[in-house]
Amino acid sequence: MSDWSPQDEHAMRIALDQAQNAWLVGEVPVGAVIMREGQVIATGYNRPITTHDPTAHAEMVALRHAAQLLENYRLPECELYVTLEPCAMCAMALMHARFKRVVFAATDPKTGAAGSVIDLFAQGQLNHHTEVQGGLMADACGQVLRDFFAERRAQQKAERLLANSGADASPEPVDDDAIPAGEATEVQVSSLPQSPYSPDTPQT
């Protein structure tokens, strides 16, 4: 889709700012914002590591804030913008909350539940149907994720080189389990000419 509105782009830029906040605290950089009639209702960024909460994805954090602020667990007039395709948990939470629309940036071929792995939003058997659109600012949001994991790989390599200094041993490969896990560790940005991560991208 190429005819995104200025309001859509503005909202996704807010979500991208939230993703940067996640990076600053060591979380996988995913951010979200909830809008209603052009107004920001709530924001959130990925924080499962810092809060020791596996459900604290960016969408869930923003959703909880919005529901508390509006004093309603149903938010039928709200739209959510997120920098990475929602997982199954987040997709179902958004539909339970009766969201009108969900817009995401980069696709996630590992856990994406808006078409990449499964498409929960397209299940006709469900009692609520949320409009979903993807690809808005996919390039920029995917680049943040690529840069984050490149930085983490470099840090791991430096630590191993330091640990092995003076020893007659080659540096070991990056330990996948040492990379903090969030909503995803590999992202496919459909608008890019090549895969956003090299073959040694850590997996979870």
Image: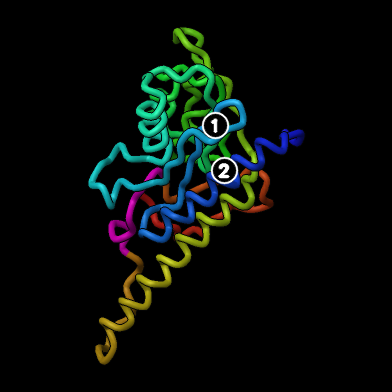
Task: Please tell me how crowded label 2 is: few (under 14), some (14-19), or many (20+) other residues with Cα within 10 Å.
Answer: many
Depth order, front residue of 187/144: 144
Q: Position of residue 142 (x, y in %)?
A: 56, 51
Judged from this view, the residue extending furthest toward the right is 3
Q: Kindly identify the residue that appears in the image at 37 percent across and 40 percent down.
A: 57
Q: x, y (%) of residue 107?
A: 55, 40
Which quadrant holds the N terminus?
top right
The tag on residue 35 is: 1
Which amino acid, mark 1?
Met
Which residue has dot 2 on it? 106
On screen, residue 165 versus residue 45, left or right, reads left
Measure the alpha-carbon separation of dots 1 and 2.
19 Å
Residue 61 in which image quadrant: top left
Query: In the shown orientation, is residue 89 left or right of residue 13?
Result: left
Per the rendered image, the range of residues in magenta is 175-183
Q: Circle 1 — which element?
A: strand
